[in-house]
Image (cartoon, rainbow, N blue to C red):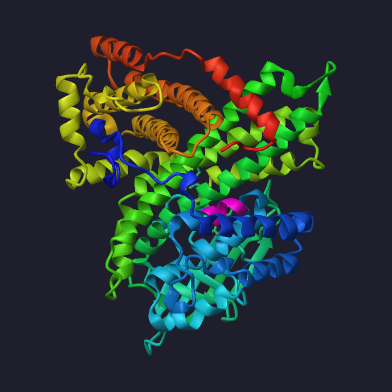
């Protein structure tokens, strides 16, 4: 893999794939920055001041705010131009999601509308269906909801019990069943409902609120996201005209799973926005609050937390926009002509399904970490509702549960890469053999021309070797869940480390960057490498312990220790630099 070539899905795991240019937030165009600024101003002036009322479930207000979003054009971002949309790239779409992220429940309400609520129609709807519904959704006249989960099937949606039966005259389907935890249920007008035709063929339907037999259950009393509506959608003999079948009979799984790839990426953007919000609360509080006659920000214990939070955020942000940039690059080369455009579009996105799952897990866990530390920095006040950090903490938790739980996503990551390897799209098995035959080959350690110090790049190269060595050592046992989880964790750590290093490196080589920013980039790369290395080491050690025995285990442990050792000189100074800069600016630094 040479610099500048597009990295294929999963290819980052291969030793020789180090390099390649990637999209980094420093590359946002003027237009993207303007869209971000407009969204940020809207959130600051229109949403945050009314958030408390929305949290008390004033859904009329929530709908009014959604319509304001629509007036601003925020619902047009992912809509095709042919239907009056802006059809902006994924990077811009993520940026908008990130800027709404700090609003917590409102962000989820709005992504319920623009993401899972509308995208199935965009990707799989017929022209007639799009003409009928898209305009209503983009103007905010109608609100959308996505109904996949059921009381007895969450992670396993294909076991759905909701049924659809074709009427004798063939004009309509009759839907029966219960959908669980449906976002926007209280005020949605259009529901994408998954049901099995004749109890067998998993399919999707566009169901209008006004259709007889559809009713909404009581609001769930949730731990967080209190301003979103979450309720059951009950279907009792709901007559849905056949023209409201979405996509093909028996192909509902394609709709459900493909929409989730972009959904996972959007969730990653939303949680990064929330984590930046929580971080700003923590940095501000650390400067203001004094104990022992000094601000909290002067204590090493607090400063280290701030530095670690910045480093995880940097890795999460680098990873997210890297994946968004990859999707954009892949979509850009598609021929737009032809009725099968969205089919090819979905295939293009599917190539990076593993990276989308990595982003979902890493970014949602970054938010959990940042929100938790932000609350800790507030001490007892963090536990009190008057402080915004309390809401950030509560709202964070569910992100590890929806859009596929983090366990399901962790299991998916290696599974998806194996599938690509088995289909010949990824040269994984050949690389396993090559590393097994020569584990000491240092060919991956090339850091020529890198403005970043070499040790972190060597570490990255060695982590890839270790990942391949473990794969080889596990043989067929690699599909056992406990082992898949460790492989998922290793892949996540590699991707986070590589995204941080490549971004720092790329930005440092640009001509218009000052010495101060270079120093901070060096520092953040060092700290984020140390943190991800710790996660990698833990996963590799568990993988070895679970997967191999006796002398082979001892040998693998030694290899983990040897290849995982790198120079960490300057780690404390790097953390201190980040903490200084964070307390000075009172916000995330990059
Ligand atoms: C606030 C909120 C909003 C939501 N909004 C929507 C929405 O708009 N539309 C919608 O359709 N759904 C929605 N959901 C549902 C959500 O997607 C599901 O809760 C989620 O998919 C998990 O399903 P479950 O809750 O049934 O958990 P389960 O599937 O029962 O999982 C329970 C635990 O077991 C683990 N587990 C399950 N299966 C396996 C396996 N094979 N291997 C290993 N571990 C496994 C899970 O990781 C989890 O830890 C929402 C949920 C919440 C809480």
Q: Is residue 72 left or right of residue 162?
A: right
Question: Foreground residue, 99 or 175?
Answer: 99
| Residue 556, quarter of the rendered image | top left
| Residue situated furthest right in the rendering | 293
Residue visible at 27% across and 75% down in the picture: 338
Residue visible at 28% across and 60% down in the picture: 333
| Residue 510, quarter of the rendered image | top left
Residue visible at 60% across and 61% down in the picture: 110
Which quarter of the rendering shows the N terminus? top left
Q: Is residue 106 visible?
A: yes
Give the image location of residue 155, x and y in percent. Answer: 45, 49
Question: Foreground residue, 165 or 157?
Answer: 157
Q: Is residue 378 visible?
A: no
Residue 300 higher or lower than 9, as above or below:
above
Check residue 97 for magenta coloring: yes
Residue visible at 34% across and 54% down in the picture: 329
Residue 138 higher or lower than 109, as above or below:
below
Number of labels in the image equals 0
Question: Foreground residue, 525 or 64?
Answer: 525
Q: Which residues are magenta?
A: 95-99
Which quarter of the rendering shows the C terminus? top right
| Residue situated furthest bottom in the rendering | 169
| Residue 516, quarter of the rendered image | top right
Give the image location of residue 570, x and y in percent. Answer: 51, 14
Q: Please name the predominant secondary structure of the magenta segment in the image.
A: helix
Give the image location of residue 39, x and y in percent. Answer: 62, 58
Q: Is residue 427 left or right of residue 393?
A: left
Give the image location of residue 369, x and y in percent. Answer: 59, 33
Check residue 279 for magenta coloring: no
């Amino acid at each position: 893999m040479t610099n500048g070539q597009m990295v294929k899905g999963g290819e980052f795991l291969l030793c020789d794939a180090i390099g390649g240019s990637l999209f980094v937030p420093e590359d946002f165009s003027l237009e993207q920055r303007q869209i971000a600024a407009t969204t940020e101003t809207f959130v600051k002036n229109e949403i945050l001041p009314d958030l408390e009322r929305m949290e008390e479930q004033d859904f009329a207000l929530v709908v009014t705010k959604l319509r304001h979003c629509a007036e601003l054009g925020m619902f047009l971002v992912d809509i095709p131009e042919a239907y009056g949309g802006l059809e902006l790239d994924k990077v811009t779409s993520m940026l908008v999601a990130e800027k709404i992220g700090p609003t917590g429940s409102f962000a989820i309400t709005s992504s319920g509308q623009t993401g899972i609520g509308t995208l199935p129609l965009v990707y799989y709807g017929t022209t007639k269906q799009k003409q009928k519904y898209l305009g209503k959704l983009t103007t905010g006249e109608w609100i959308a909801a996505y109904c996949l989960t059921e009381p007895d099937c969450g992670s396993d949606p294909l076991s759905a019990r909701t049924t659809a039966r074709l009427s004798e005259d063939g004009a309509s389907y009759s839907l029966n069943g219960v959908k669980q935890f449906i976002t926007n249920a209280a005020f949605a007008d259009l529901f994408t409902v998954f049901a099995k035709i004749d109890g067998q063929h998993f399919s999707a339907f566009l169901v209008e609120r006004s259709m007889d037999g559809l009713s909404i259950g009581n609001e769930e009393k949730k731990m967080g996201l209190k301003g979103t509506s979450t309720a059951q959608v009950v279907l009792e003999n709901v007559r849905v005209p056949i023209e409201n079948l979405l996509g093909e009979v028996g192909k509902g799984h394609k709709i459900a799973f493909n929409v989730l790839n972009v959904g996972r990426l959007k969730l990653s953007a939303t949680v990064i926005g929330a984590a930046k919000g929580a971080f700003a609360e923590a940095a501000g509080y650390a400067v203001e609050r004094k104990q022992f006659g000094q601000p909290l920000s002067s204590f090493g214990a607090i400063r280290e937390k701030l530095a670690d939070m910045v480093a995880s955020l940097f890795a999460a942000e680098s990873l997210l926009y890297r994946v968004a940039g990859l999707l954009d690059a892949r979509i850009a080369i598609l021929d737009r002509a032809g009725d099968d455009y969205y089919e090819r579009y979905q295939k293009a996105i599917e190539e990076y399904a593993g990276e989308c799952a990595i982003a979902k897990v890493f970014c949602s866990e970054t938010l959990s970490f940042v929100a938790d530390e932000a609350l800790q920095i507030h001490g007892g006040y963090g536990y009190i509702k008057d402080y915004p950090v309390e809401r950030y903490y509560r709202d964070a938790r569910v992100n590890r549960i929806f859009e596929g739980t983090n366990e399901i996503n962790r299991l998916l990551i290696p599974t998806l890469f194996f599938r690509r390897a088995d289909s010949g799209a990824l040269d994984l098995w050949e690389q396993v053999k090559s590393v097994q035959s020569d584990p000491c080959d240092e060919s991956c350690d090339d850091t020529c021309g890198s403005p970043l110090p070499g040790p972190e790049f060597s570490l990255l190269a060695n982590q890839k070797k270790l990942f391949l060595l473990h794969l080889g050592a596990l043989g067929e046992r690699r599909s056992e869940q406990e082992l898949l989880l460790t492989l998922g964790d290793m892949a996540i750590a590699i991707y986070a480390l590589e995204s941080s290093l490549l971004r720092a490196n790329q930005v440092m080589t640009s001509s218009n960057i000052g010495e101060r920013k270079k120093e901070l980039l060096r520092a953040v790369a060092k700290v984020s490498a140390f943190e991800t290395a710790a996660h990698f080491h833990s996963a590799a050690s568990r993988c070895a312990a679970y997967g191999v025995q006796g002398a082979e285990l001892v040998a693998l442990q030694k290899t983990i220790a040897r290849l995982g050792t790198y120079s960490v000189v300057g780690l404390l100074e790097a953390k201190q630099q980040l903490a200084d800069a964070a307390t000075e600016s009172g916000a995330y630094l990059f």
